[in-house]
Image (cartoon, rainbow, N blue to C red):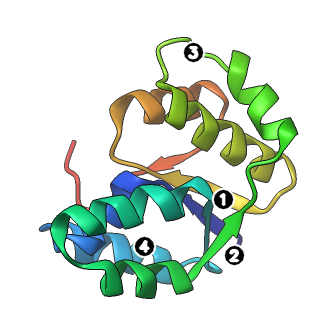
Amino acid sequence: MPALYVDTSALGRVLLGEPDAGAVLDALERFDGWLASEMLRVELRRLALRSDCLGDADRLLEGTALVPVDGGVLRAAETIEPRGVATLDAIHLATAVKLRDADLIAAMVTYDTRLAAGARHHGLDVLAPGRSG
């Protein structure tokens, strides 16, 4: 089974031990690993720094295949639709679309509603494990 794309809202739940953290981990284990933009390293470690859990962030990052933020991704993020997607989320979205087009991911895991809407706009399946509705 292909891998999943994860954003910071998903791994942040695991890092902070949120109620749906177990559901996120269960979903990740059902796929062939998980990938994320290299930007996730900065976002997750900044969250960990504020929460005093850098070691936990580093352990999560060890299991994450990080994809470089290259010029092609940045150019795609500049104009990616929908326009309401925030700047950093546009980079996540452009990365996920690139990985989907290369048949490397099956879906995106995110709890960010705008990013999820953007992913669906581009035909990506979106998972939010543990979230009802």
| Residue matched to label 1 | 106
Which residue corresponds to the image point at 48% horizontal and 83% vertical from the top-left? 29
Residue 117 point in image, percent of width and height: 46, 27
| Residue matched to label 4 | 27
Horizontal side of 85 relative to 129 (left or right) equals right
Res. 117 mark: none
Secondary structure under badge 2? loop
Observer able to see residue 124: no
**Residue type marked 3:** Pro
**Circle 2 Cα neighbour tier, 10 Å, few/some/many (<14 / 14–19 / ≥20):** few
Q: Quadrant of residue 17?
A: bottom left
The alpha-carbon separation of the residues under discs 4 and 3 comes to 27 Å
Res. 82 mark: 3
Residue 38 point in image, percent of width and height: 63, 60
The alpha-carbon separation of the residues under discs 4 and 1 comes to 12 Å
Report the mark closest to the observer, 4 or 3. Answer: 3
| Residue matched to label 2 | 1
**Residue type marked 1:** Ala
**Circle 1 Cα neighbour tier, 10 Å, few/some/many (<14 / 14–19 / ≥20):** many
